[in-house]
Amino acid sequence: MDNTFLIYTFGCKLNFSESSDMARRLREKGWSEGENPAAIIVNSCAVTHAAEKKVRNYVSHLHREYPEAKIVVVGCYAALRPEEIRQWGGVAAVFGNRDKLHVVNFVLGEAIPEVPTFFSTYSSNDRTRSFLKIQDGCDYHCTYCTVCDARGESRSDNIANVLKNVEKIHEAGLKEVNITGVNLGTFGKGTDENFFDLLKAIDQQNLVDRVRISSIEPNLLTDEIIDFVAQSRVVMPHFHIPLQSGSDKILALMKRRYKREVFQNKILKIKELMPSACIAIDIITGFPTESEADFTDSYDFVKSLPLSYLHVFTYSRRPNTVAAAMKEQVPEPVKHERTLRLVELSETKKRHFYQEHLGEVRPVLWESEESDGKMFGFTDNYIKVSSPFRKDWVNQIVDYELTEDVFCRVSE
């Protein structure tokens, strides 16, 4: 039990990056991951009611399974409702997002140091890719969202330190960097640096083979960024852009900072310059006041765009948000039905996107995962494919023909 730990991560890639960093720091101090742990770290999510429930249930399960372990709950749920979590059985400490650097010191029994305004992290427990945190927090205050409260104001790393972390990732043998943050486009706020400058610097550094932008707001995805990605050797033709609604009325109520015409123009420009690009979007169903006409308007807009797939979220009423106080809440069965319709549309679009590239030969980065004698990898434009397992292909980029039998299931 001495010097053993477990980490469980819920939610976004940013949490995954931070969890990996905590695990690495503990291993550097002589700790190891294993059964019968002395400490368990739960990196929590609070984006929806369902996410919070999952965290609560899992902490309860962990306390029953490991009654002697010290459970430390960190992350967004911990930041929003620390007093509630302190009442849970087995919880020894609660740390919000700004205090995550304290977690390792607490587990080790060390003094708690001063925490910088921003701290960078990167994951290294995947043999092929790393999630690199370059930014945290958000100033947008969308009416449905608690991230501003949970993560604080927008703040970020500097280009010089990001490049040092990319060098460390390269030295660890990883081929791909996924740039993560809460609102990436605000990188460099308050300084003379910006996200476009960062992309150019990573491209010029020319160390890792692949860079992906995890998510960027449509109003911050500038034409110069799109133009740059189109000619970059390093930054992949893969975009994740949150739309949230295809109805201008709902976008205004959400306090999003664009209208759908802006979003449409970004999508069309990407496809004009990069016809093979993968474009994923986030969309929310059942936001308060969303009528059937509003949903149809949104659905038809999304259907008309050359998108690759959708991340569909059912609106979840979050405490202390403007949207939670709106009177015209959409009934749960209606929200559920709308979600299913958009999920079906997503599967159709993803199937079409895969079929568009049938017969092409594209570079695939192969992962170490093996299942039923197969290995898996992703093309430059994020098509997931499989192959009979070959050890010499792990963490290698191999030109590979896209045939019907190598495509992974659309729902995967």
Image (tube, rainbow, N blue to C red):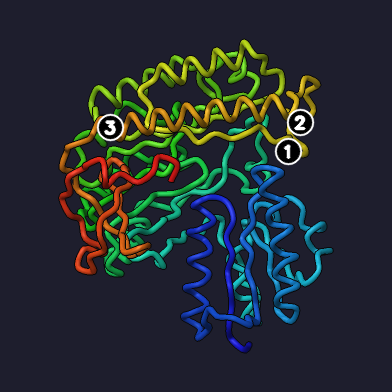
Whether the residues at callouts 2 and 1 have beta carbons within 8 Å, the answer is yes
Q: Mark 2 points at which residue?
A: 324
- The span from disc 3 to disc 2 (Cα, nearest Å) is 41 Å
Mark 1 or 3, which is nearer the eye? 3
Residue 170 image position (x, y, % from top left): 27, 64
* Label 1 crowd bin: few (<14), some (14–19), many (20+), radius 10 Å: some
- Vertically, is 12 above or below 341? below
Q: What residue type is labelled 3?
A: Gln
Number of the label disc, if any, that sits on residue 221: none
Q: Which residue is at a point 23% across and 47% down the rendered structure image?
A: 234
Whether the residues at callouts 1 and 3 have beta carbons within 8 Å, the answer is no
Circle nearer the N terminus (2, 1): 1
Q: Which amino acid does label 2 sit on?
A: Ala
Circle nearer the N terminus (1, 3): 1
User: For numbered disc 2, what is the local secondary structure?
Assistant: helix
Mark 3 or 2, which is nearer the eye? 3
Can the viewer see residue 222?
yes
- Vertically, is 58 above or below 204? below
Q: In which quarter of the image is the N terminus?
A: bottom right
Viewer-side residue, 18 vs 353: 353
Residue 15 image position (x, y, % from top left): 54, 56
Number of the label disc, if any, that sits on residue 318: 1
Can the viewer see residue 200?
no
Residue 8 image position (x, y, % from top left): 59, 64
Q: Which amino acid does label 1 sit on?
A: Arg
Q: Name the residue under label 3.
A: 355
- Vertically, is 373 above or below 356? below
Is 170 on the left-hand or right-hand side of 189? left
- The span from disc 1 to disc 3 (Cα, nearest Å) is 39 Å
- Vertically, is 323 above or below 111? above
